[in-house]
Amino acid sequence: MNFKDKVAVVTGAGGTLCSVIAYEIASLGAKVVLVGRTAEKLEKVKEKIDAIGGDCMIYPCDVTDKTAIAQLAQTVKEKYGLCDFLINGAGGNNAKAMPTLTKFDKRELDGTLPEGERGIYDIDMDAFESVLNINTMGTVIPTLEFAKQMAQKGGGAVVNFASMNSYCPLTRCFSYAMSKAAIANLTQSFAAYFAPANIRVNAIAPGFMVNERSKNYLGTVEDGLTARGQAVIDHTPAGRFGEAYDLVGCAKWLLDCDASGFVTGITVPVDGGFLTLGGV
Ligand SMILES: NC(=O)c1ccc[n+]([C@@H]2O[C@H](COP(=O)([O-])OP(=O)(O)OC[C@H]3O[C@@H](n4cnc5c(N)ncnc54)[C@H](OP(=O)(O)O)[C@@H]3O)[C@@H](O)[C@H]2O)c1
């Protein structure tokens, strides 16, 4: 019963993966704070949690906004008490930060790429920086704020979101891959720093999970795969994409101090075996 009445802050809680994790820990009795920028997405998750008699609140804000996160922490303390668990799920990529090309083409030098193709010099650098910021500072800022509460309470657990890109970058994902590699590293250094406060910091590295956007660029096993989707499936021994529910057991394990009390600073791949193959 390590979730009953625990206070859990979940960022990215309106999204595909963390909406399910938020729901599951609420169903075990945690008081869950649903954080994301879009209130409507959070409301939908709240409705589901309300429907099972769970306790949750929504707090629309941007995780990269220090002032907003400090206000969130104050609100959480007043409404539910000090935080026990933080799930840093907010994050993502931005197509404008990616080229369409997978490798350098000399036509990039004289601007003669075909219409619709984008090389590395056509990337929107503001988008590039924003991906870095959301995925890195969007984890750092909430962690620093809520680790204060966990330290005051005598301990807690943080779960970050890494990626397959944390281990080896996919093509075209420069800023996303760089930021998710940073998350694996940050998970280690924060774990070491906060260990004396009895705060464990770990990460989940999801493999290729189905979400609304993935259907566009990977396709689906049922209705047909894109070339990239086929490459992923060929590289995934489980032979399928992951579903949000595939992460729930790992998230619960990493949060539960009885189950994983001696586990800190690790990134756990939940990937259908993607990392077991070299791709050849
Ligand atoms: N799906 C996958 O295959 C996969 C694989 C590896 C890693 N991941 C990682 O797992 C995490 C969850 O992914 P997902 O598939 O559930 O993505 P998702 O459906 O896009 O959910 C991410 C959520 O984060 C919120 N968010 C983004 N930027 C934010 C910001 N600055 N402040 C507050 N909230 C913000 C978004 O809501 P708003 O736009 O309303 O703010 C969105 O609901 C992400 O970190 C992602 O990078 C996903």
Image (cartoon, rainbow, N blue to C red):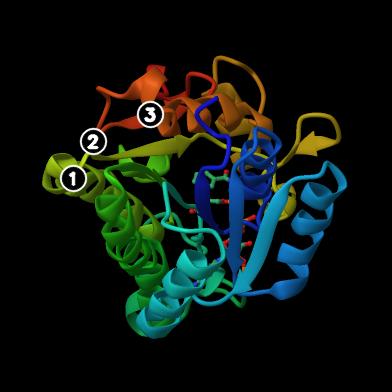
- Between 240 and 65, the residue placed more toward the observer is 65
Residue 110 horizontal side relative to residue 32, left or right: left
At 39% across and 74% down in the image, what residue appears?
Answer: 128
- Between 98 and 247, the residue placed more toward the observer is 247
Query: What whole-number distance in Å separates the C-alpha atoms at marks 3 and 1?
Result: 22 Å
Relative to 268, say whether 74 is above or below. below
Q: Which amino acid does label 1 sit on?
A: Ala
Q: Which amino acid does label 2 sit on?
A: Gly
* SS category of the residue bearing label 1: helix
- Between 156 and 241, the residue placed more toward the observer is 156
Quadrant position of ligand 1: bottom right
* SS category of the residue bearing label 2: loop
Q: Which amino acid does label 3 sit on?
A: Val
* Residue at numbered disc 1: 197
Mark 1 neighbour density, 10 Å: few (under 14) some (14–19) many (20 or more): some
Return the mark for residue 265: 2
